[in-house]
Every structure is written in structure tokens, then in C-alpha cells.
Amino acid sequence: MRQLLKTGTGAALVVAIMFIGSLGLWVGTPLMWLWIGSQIQGATASLGAALGVMFIGVIATIGLLAAVLAKLSDVYRANCLARGQTDPGHFVLEGVLVISAGLTLAVFVVWFFFFAGTSPVPIGIHL
């Protein structure tokens, strides 16, 4: 496994895992905790309990995913140093997070305006 991480293929694999993890951060975490909150609210009829659990759960999940992504960034940096390259710092992780956030936002905007049945102009308002 260590030999794989010293190759360019290993670096690409680590970046791909970082990208998947960052999509989980932007998409998976909110959807998962919305679903869990809906189950809690349905079972207890308490919106406050559902919101409290969702708030704590989102914070904990984001903290966990951020730690995993930082560790993957450290693996990528060690990979670069093992191949004799300069230390890129956390530049790759930052780039992955920005690109995945932009992609997530673009997909959401397309879904919202074209597939969710919404109108960009509120219905019933005459201009």
C-alpha cells in the first residue's frame, strides 16, 4: 500500500477520495440529518427535539468529515514529499472543497429552477 501512495496514481486516488468526502460534506450531511430529524419529529411530534438533534448531529458530522479530509490532505502532502516534490500545503484540499461546493451549488440551482416546479417570479405578483 505504501508503494501505491508513492506513485501518481496514489495521489490521484487520494484526491478522488477527498472529492467524494467533500460532496458528502455539502450534500450527504444535510440530507442525512434532515431525514433523521424528520423521523424524530414524526415519532415524537416535537419539532424542538428534532431541531436540537439535527443541530448537534450536523455539527458533529461536519467536525468528523473535516478531520477526515484534513488527514487525507496530510496523506496527499506526504505522497508529494515522498516523490520528491515540494510541499503543496493544503492547497489541493482547498481546491477540492471549492470545486465541490461550486458543483453542488450549480446542481442545486438547476434542480430548483427547472425540476422542483418553482418559478423565479412569485406567482400572483403583477409587475
Image (spheres, rainbow, N blue to C red):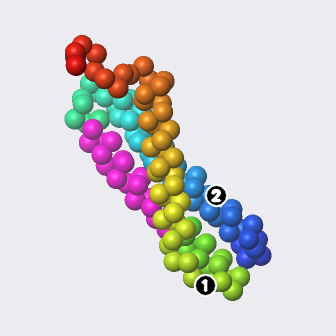
Badge 1 local density, few (<14 within 10 Å), some, or many (20+)?
A: few
Residue 29: x %, y % from top left: 44, 45
- Helix, strand, or loop for circle 2? helix
Identify the image quadrant of residue 11: bottom right
Q: Please, what is the dominant secondary structure of the magenta stretch?
A: helix
Which residue occupies the extreme top position in the image?
Answer: 124
Identify the image quadrant of residue 80: bottom right
Name which residue type carries label 2: Ala
- Give the labeled residue for mark 1: 86
Name which residue type carries label 1: Thr
State the residue in front, 122 or 27. Answer: 122
Q: Residue placed at 48% from the left, 30% from the top?
A: 111
- Helix, strand, or loop for circle 1? loop
What span is colored magenta in the figure? 51-71
| Mark 2 and mark 1: Cα distance apart in space | 21 Å
Tell me, yes or no, whether the highlighted magenta stretch contains residue 86. Answer: no
Q: Residue placed at 24% from the left, 29% from the top?
A: 46
Q: Residue placed at 22% from the left, 15% from the top?
A: 126
Residue 73: x %, y % from top left: 55, 70
Tell me, yes or no, whether the highlighted magenta stretch contains residue 55. Answer: yes
- Quarter of the rendering occupied by the N terminus: bottom right
Residue 92: x %, y % from top left: 55, 68
Q: Which mark is residue 94?
A: none
Please, is residue 113 above or below residue 86 in the view? above
Identify the image quadrant of residue 112: top left
- Give the labeled residue for mark 2: 16
Which residue occupies the extreme front position in the image?
Answer: 127
